[in-house]
Image (cartoon, coloured by chain):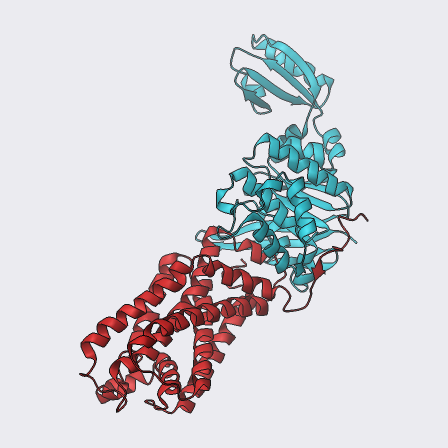
Chain colours: A red, B cyan
């Protein structure tokens, strides 16, 4: 056989179930980074506007965690909301774009395993979520005093929350056939659940019925656990939040991996 | 070991009007080093068969293997051995040509591959386009990048699904020179095309699909020899007699009719004279693959499948 058919000599070749994961992760990060004005800067601006408006209107009028000022309380909520929404947006929009423009074929003909797809898409979602979250934190931290009580809770809820939303975005991207289905998922499920999760208020201030309803919302535990990392106090125990977020993460990841393995709506 | 092996492949799609059988019991092998043509009219099942081979679709029944690797059970090994140029002109607008090629190689686990990428770019007339964004390229250039992407992991088996549909003459020539060279160097090539002269010039063996079934499978030369091998070509100012219309191709004034032997030629001419037609510039030549194709698709020839 000739040189053209022989295995590449100069190139490095990796095999195994995770071969190619790094490349797909790199490509997914590069994809949002190349349009970072839209994917990172814009959500940071949105969060700052929320802070300016709600902070201005409600500072001194609403009591949250005892002595914690409203603006200080709001900052971690906005950071986590941005992390969650952008992690979802990254995997879901990337996948639906590739499906609709047809360039998903480049991935479909490759030997990438369902684990490689999963780790790369969810990994890129975590990177985008963290990038936006850090951006929001860096800009908003100047508006109110903020302490860090326990950084481990902050790191855990950031990564677990972003991974959960990245995996959920991947499921939505697999399921959706049109952009407006993703938009509907975002506007009618993700947005209400994040807004009603206690980003802007402590659920303790709600009437008992709505407090109970809030406790059924998994987003509440992500925000509440994340906030615990800053204030050392929260609406529920951070261990309960950890258990619920971990459980939800495991379920969504399991569903996501299964759909990728069977090629749900992508391999006909 | 065959480069590609299709065994009893069937594919049924559910549609609003009930189940559609896109492929029905397709069985044939493509040997290593062959330049193989897969022909058939639109909707015959060519792209469905290629999609199953490439892992884009799953067979309802039967199995497909690439160099002995089942495309479902050993999908990673099978896909490493095959490079597919898709029919649709797709691209990722976020990247430059070189980025797209490095990324595609990376999906196959191939890294630090720039020497080969440079060779691909040079051979496909893309040497000065490495840093151009995919969005800036013309359709023909995008098509070349698709070919480069399919070859970036150096697959021994190359699949080209209608690669020259709507492509300019220059690219067709560049592409065929390059693919013919790869074939000489030992690559197996599977080609689907609408341009029958390309299949005739390039492919040593051909399968024809019709309504999801293989209706002809033979060496190109045998297919040409075995069917109506004579072609009458003439100009005519009058309408063609109805008795001849079914077997003919009419392009403006030019009429082409196939015949199996000299006696059939004589009878065609007799019909023309009988109808008062005076054929001008009459030529008698050898039939080409297009004539064979038309004849087989009409179902006038029984299945021509070499053992």
The x, y position of residue A195, in whole percent, is 29, 75
Above or below residue A220? Residue B120 is above
Above or below residue B277? Residue B108 is below
The x, y position of residue B62, in whole percent, is 66, 57
Above or below residue A51? Residue B142 is above
Tell me what residue is drawn at x 27 percent, y 73 percent: A51
Q: Residue furthest right?
A: A1
In the image shown, does A87 or A134 lie closer to the viewer? Answer: A134
Q: Residue furthest front?
A: A142
Tell me what residue is drawn at x 36 percent, y 85 percent: A147
- Position of B171 with respect to B2 (left or right) is left
In the image shown, does A205 or A226 lie closer to the viewer? Answer: A226
In the image shown, does B136 or B40 lie closer to the viewer? Answer: B136
Tell me what residue is drawn at x 71 percent, y 42 percent: B36
Residue A172 figure quarter:
bottom left
Q: In this rendering, does residue B301 appear at all?
A: no
- Position of B71 with respect to B251 (left or right) is right
Tell me what residue is drawn at x 63 percent, y 10 percent: B281
Q: In this rendering, does residue A55 appear at all?
A: yes
């Amino acid at each position: 056989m000739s040189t053209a058919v022989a295995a590449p000599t100069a190139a490095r070749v990796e095999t195994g179930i995770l071969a190619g994961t790094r490349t797909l992760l790199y490509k997914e990060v590069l994809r949002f980074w190349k349009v970072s004005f839209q994917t990172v800067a814009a959500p940071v601006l949105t969060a700052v506007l929320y802070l300016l408006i709600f902070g201005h209107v409600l500072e001194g009028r609403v009591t949250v965690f005892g002595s914690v000022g409203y603006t200080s309380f709001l900052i971690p909520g906005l950071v986590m909301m941005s992390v969650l929404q952008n992690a979802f947006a990254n995997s879901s929009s990337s996948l639906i774009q590739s499906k609709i423009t047809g360039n998903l074929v480049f991935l479909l003909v490759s030997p990438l395993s369902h684990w490689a797809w999963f780790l790369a898409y969810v990994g890129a979602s975590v990177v985008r979520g963290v990038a936006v979250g850090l951006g929001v934190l860096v800009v908003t931290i100047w508006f109110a005093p903020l302490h860090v009580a326990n950084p481990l809770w902050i790191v855990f809820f950031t990564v677990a929350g972003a991974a959960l939303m990245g995996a959920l975005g991947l499921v939505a991207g697999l399921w959706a056939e049109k952009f407006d289905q993703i938009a509907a998922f975002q506007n009618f499920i993700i947005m209400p659940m994040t807004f009603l999760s206690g980003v802007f208020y402590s659920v303790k201030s709600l009437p008992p019925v709505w407090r109970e309803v809030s406790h059924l919302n998994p987003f509440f535990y992500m925000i509440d656990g994340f906030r615990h990392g800053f204030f050392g106090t929260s609406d529920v125990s951070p261990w309960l939040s950890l258990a619920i977020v971990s459980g939800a993460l495991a379920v969504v990841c399991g569903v996501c991996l299964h759909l990728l393995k069977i090629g749900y709506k992508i391999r006909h | 070991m065959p480069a590609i092996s299709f065994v009893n492949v069937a594919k049924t799609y559910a549609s609003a009007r009930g189940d559609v059988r896109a492929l029905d019991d397709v069985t044939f092998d493509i040997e290593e080093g062959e330049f193989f043509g897969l022909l058939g009219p639109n909707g015959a099942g060519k792209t469905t068969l290629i999609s199953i081979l490439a892992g884009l679709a799953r067979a309802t029944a039967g199995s497909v293997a690439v160099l002995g690797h089942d495309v479902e059970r050993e999908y990673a090994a099978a896909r490493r051995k095959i490079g597919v140029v898709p029919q649709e002109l797709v691209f990722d607008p976020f990247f430059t040509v070189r980025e797209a090629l490095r990324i595609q190689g990376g999906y196959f686990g191939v890294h630090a591959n720039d020497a080969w990428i440079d060779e691909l770019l040079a051979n496909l007339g893309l040497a000065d386009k490495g840093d151009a964004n995919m969005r800036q390229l013309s359709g023909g250039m995008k098509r070349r990048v698709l070919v480069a992407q399919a070859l970036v992991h150096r697959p021994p088996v190359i699949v080209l699904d209608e690669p020259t549909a709507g492509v300019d003459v220059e690219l067709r020539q560049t592409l065929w020179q390059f693919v013919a060279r790869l074939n000489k160097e030992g690559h197996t090539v599977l080609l689907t095309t609408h341009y029958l002269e390309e299949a005739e010039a390039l492919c040593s063996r051909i399968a024809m699909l019709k309504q999801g079934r293989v209706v002809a499978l033979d060496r190109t030369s045998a297919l040409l020899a075995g069917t109506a091998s004579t072609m009458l070509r003439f100009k005519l100012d009058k309408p063609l007699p109805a008795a001849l219309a079914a077997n003919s191709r009419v392009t403006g004034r030019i009429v082409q009719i196939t015949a199996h032997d000299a006696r059939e030629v004589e009878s065609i001419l007799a019909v023309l004279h009988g109808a008062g037609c005076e054929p001008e510039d009459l030529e008698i030549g050898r039939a080409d693959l297009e004539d064979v194709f038309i004849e087989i698709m009409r179902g006038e020839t029984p299945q021509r499948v070499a053992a």
